[in-house]
Image: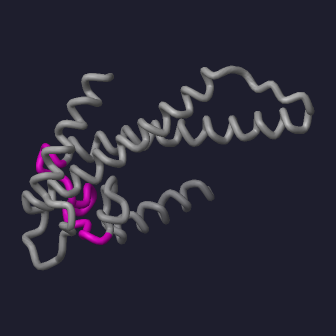
Amino acid sequence: MATAAFADYEKLARIRAAVGADYVPDDGEDYMSGRQLDYFRMLLLEWKRSIHTAAEHTLQSLQDGPIREADLNDRASSETDWGIELRTRDRQRKLIAKIDSALRRIDAGEYGFCEVTGDPIGLKRLIARPVATMTVEAQEAHERREKISRDD
């Protein structure tokens, strides 16, 4: 795990130097050019690193010791807070899998294109949600089908 994180950190530093600190993709460029792909790789790796950092802080807090609140209400409140924190970490663990999948799509040359239609997802959507796999329209259609099947 540590060597993979170190490799990601080295890769992130190289990409950051290649892309430039103030670069933001725009529609005037070729879609999913090398620089855009590097930009999104950088976004994804930074996001993944921040999740790992937050998880390390949570783990350290858990290892520091059990909750020792004297008052039952304070203890219940602390336990509730920990429950929320652990659920958040679980969601972020699942998000890391999506980030890794997006990084694999970049490497495979499939990033930025809808997995349903094959159309470009769009820069604004990818900047807002770098792990997106569908265009807005395809995602809306998917959610409508999902809602209909849930209602049945």
Does residue 79 appear to the left or right of 46 in the view shown? right
Does residue 35 appear to the left or right of 7 in the view shown? left
Residue 76: x, y in percent?
84, 35
> Which part of the image, by quadrant, shows the C terminus?
bottom right
Whether residue 101 is situated above or below residue 2 in the rendered picture: below
The quarter of the displayed image where residue 132 is located: bottom left
Does residue 35 appear to the left or right of 12 in the view shown? left
> Which part of the image, by quadrant, shows the N terminus?
top left
Task: Between residue 25 and residue 16, name the one nearer to us.
Answer: 16
Which residue appears at 36% of the width and 71% of the height?
137
Let me know if residue 132 is in the magenta part: no
Q: Which residues are magenta?
A: 106-124
Residue 4: x, y in percent?
26, 27
Residue 119: x, y in percent?
20, 66
Residue 71: x, y in percent?
92, 33
Which residue appears at 20% of the width and 61% of the height?
21
The quarter of the displayed image where residue 101 is located: top left
The quarter of the displayed image where residue 134 is located: bottom left
Does residue 3 appear to the left or right of 151 in the view shown? left
Let me know if residue 109 is in the magenta part: yes
